[in-house]
Image (cartoon, grey):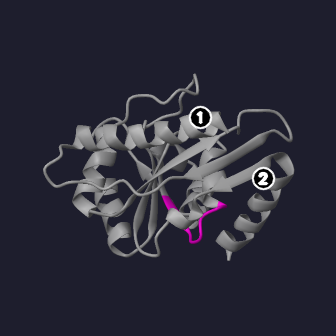
C-alpha cells in the first residue's frame, strides 16, 4: 500500500518538476535483472524506480537506515542497507536472493554520488553480483536531475550486458561502466 501511494506521488512530482524522457524500458526483462546505474543526485533512485515496470529493490548506504521512521519507509519502498566500508556479505547475499526470485535489483556502480557528473571508477561489487547471479545487466543512464525546474531529465535503459564466467569482477564492472558511458555519449549526440 505504501509503495503504491509513494509511486503515484513521486511519479506525479517528477513529471511536474522535470520534462521526463524515458528510453529503452523494453530492455528490462520479465525475470530478475540488475539495473547498473550512474549516480549524481538524490533523485536518481526515485526517477528510475518510478519508471520501471515492476518494483525495484536497491542498496542504500546504511546511514540512511539509522532513523526508525526512515528505515521503515525505505524498506517498504525496496531499499536495503549496505555497509560501504568493505565487502558487505549480507547485502550481497540479499541482492543475489532478489535476483534469484526474479526481482529488479538496482545498484549505483560508483558506490557514491559523482560530484562532477562524470562517471567514476566502478566498484567491483557490481561485477561480483553480475557474475554470481548471471542475471542480465541493464546499463542505466540517469541525466538532468540536477538542473532547474522544467529541465529535460530522464533515464535511458540500454541493451543487456552479458557477463562471462572467466571475467574477473573488475573487468565486468569496467565493461558495465563502458556500456553506461556509451549511453551518455548517445544522449549527448541527441
Q: Is residue 121 left or right of residue 181?
A: left
Which region shows up in magenta?
50-57
Q: Quadrant of the N terminus?
A: bottom right
Residue lying furthest front: 189
Circle on res. 14:
2
Q: Is residue 182 left or right of residue 76?
A: left
Q: Which SS type dominates the magenta stretch?
A: loop
Q: Is residue 55 left or right of residue 30?
A: right
Q: SS of the residue at dot 2?
A: helix
* The magenta stretch spans residue 79: no
Q: SS of the residue at dot 1?
A: loop
* Quarter of the figure with residue 184: top right
Q: Which residue is mark 1?
A: 40
Nearest the camera: 115 or 175?
A: 175
Circle on res. 73:
none
- Neighbor class of circle 2 (other Cα within 10 Å; few <14, some 14-19, many 20+) is some
| Residue 147 pos. (x, y %) | 76, 32
Among the two numbered marks 2 and 1 on one chain, the one whose residue lies closer to the N terminus: 2
* The magenta stretch spans residue 56: yes
Spatial CA distance of label 2 from label 1 is 16 Å
Nearest the camera: 46 or 151?
A: 151
| Residue 115 pos. (x, y %) | 57, 24
In contact (CB < 8 Å): disc 2 and disc 1: no
**Above or below for 174 versus 10:** above
| Residue 22 pos. (x, y %) | 67, 55
- Residue shown at the point (46%, 45%) measured from the top left: 62
Amino acid at each position: 500500500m505504501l509503495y503504491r501511494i509513494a509511486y503515484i506521488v513521486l511519479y506525479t512530482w517528477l513529471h511536474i518538476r522535470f520534462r521526463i524522457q524515458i528510453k529503452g524500458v523494453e530492455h528490462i526483462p520479465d525475470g530478475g535483472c540488475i539495473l547498473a546505474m550512474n549516480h549524481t543526485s538524490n533523485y536518481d533512485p526515485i526517477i528510475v524506480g518510478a519508471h520501471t515496470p515492476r518494483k525495484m529493490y536497491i542498496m542504500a548506504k546504511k546511514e540512511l537506515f539509522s532513523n526508525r521512521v526512515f528505515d521503515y519507509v525505505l524498506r517498504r519502498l525496496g531499499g536495503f542497507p549496505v555497509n560501504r566500508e568493505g565487502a558487505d556479505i549480507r547485502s550481497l547475499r540479499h541482492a543475489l536472493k532478489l535476483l534469484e526470485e526474479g526481482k529488479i535489483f538496482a545498484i549505483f556502480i560508483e558506490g557514491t554520488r559523482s560530484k562532477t557528473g562524470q562517471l567514476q571508477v566502478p566498484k567491483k561489487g557490481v561485477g561480483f553480483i553480475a557474475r554470481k547471479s548471471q542475471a542480465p545487466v541493464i546499463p542505466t543512464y540517469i541525466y538532468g536531475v540536477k538542473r532547474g525546474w522544467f529541465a529535460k531529465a530522464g533515464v535511458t535503459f540500454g541493451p543487456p550486458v552479458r557477463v562471462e564466467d572467466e571475467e574477473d569482477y573488475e573487468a565486468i564492472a569496467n565493461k558495465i561502466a563502458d556500456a553506461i558511458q556509451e549511453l551518455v555519449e548517445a544522449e549527448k549526440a541527441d
